Amino acid sequence: MRLPVSLVLVLSVGSALAQKPLPRLELGAGLFALSAPDYRGSNESSSYLLPAPYIKYRGERLRVDEGAQGVIFESDDLLFTLSGNLSPPADEDTPEREGMDELDAIIEIGPALNYRFSRRQRSAWWIDLPLRYAYTVNGDLDNIGWVFQPRLSWRKPARRLGEWKLRFNVGPLYASDEHHAYFYSVDDEDSTPSRPAFEADAGFSGYRTEFTYSRRIGQYWLGGFLRYDDLGNSEIEDSPLVSDNGSWTGGIALAWVFHEI
């Protein structure tokens, strides 16, 4: 049986790409589509389609991939980093927060300890212990406490171009009273008959499960994620601003890689 010429070309390009080592630097541009609740626990969601730069950097002390990481210490099975994360602001028309202050974009930064306790031929199991301090992005960086997210993580790295990079995480979340209060407390002046006053305490914030994937396909890169948050039995479950204990977040991106070294 003879294969079509187009299929032979695709298989040949994919095979050749899979033999190439990962470049130190990749630059490109693309589009990112995101659908997310206005905040964890909100019944309302928003969708975005945004242009986004594509940057990958694989240095010894600085790595830019799923966010930016500064490597403080690394051994065969232990990794200690300083990393950051950015989340968009909530929709100003969120019904649960009508008449209340808007939720700004949030930047989080802090240390993470990662321990690899089981190796497979092409994948590994890790325990991740990230602790991040959160700040609002509204002209001033106002601290709104910390978030701690211990998790069990299965990872399949892409060791060469053309291979899938996969990750599955699951674990609880904990946060300070300041962090919970920013999202879920209701002051007396903001209370209504349907939105009673509520003071959020520190502690358990629920569970999070997340799957991420990415792959280089020729000069293009495809990546995305799917996340589920469960607020059941958490310290914030009884807040009148929590209208849905379970919520999904998903995103997908496609980028054109125009430079690599």
Image (tube, helix red, strand yellow):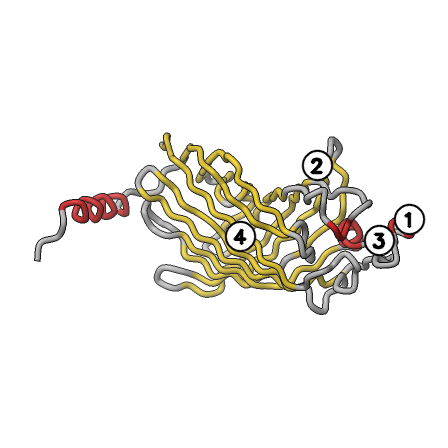
In the rendered image, residue 29, in percent from the top left (x then y), is placed at 44, 33
Mark 4 residue crowding within 10 angstroms, few (<14) / some (14–19) / many (20+): some
Q: CA distance from mark 2 to mark 3?
A: 21 Å
Q: CA distance from mark 4 to mark 1?
A: 35 Å
Discs 1/2, front: 1
Residue highlighted by disc 1: 189
Determine the secondary structure under disc 1: helix
Q: Earlier in the sequence, mark 4 or mark 2?
A: 2
> Is residue 137 shown above or below 204?
above
Q: Earlier in the sequence, mark 3 or mark 4?
A: 3
Discs 2/3, front: 3
Q: Residue 250, which numbered label?
A: 4
Residue highlighted by disc 3: 186
Residue highlighted by disc 2: 137
Q: Earlier in the sequence, mark 2 or mark 3?
A: 2
Task: Give the amino acid at mark 3.
Answer: Val
Does any portion of residue 146 appear in the rendered image? yes
Task: Give the amino acid at mark 4.
Answer: Gly
Q: CA distance from mark 3 to mark 4?
A: 28 Å
Does any portion of residue 179 appear in the rendered image? no
Q: Earlier in the sequence, mark 1 or mark 2?
A: 2
Nearer to us in this view, 218 or 116: 218
Q: Quadrant of residue 232?
A: bottom right
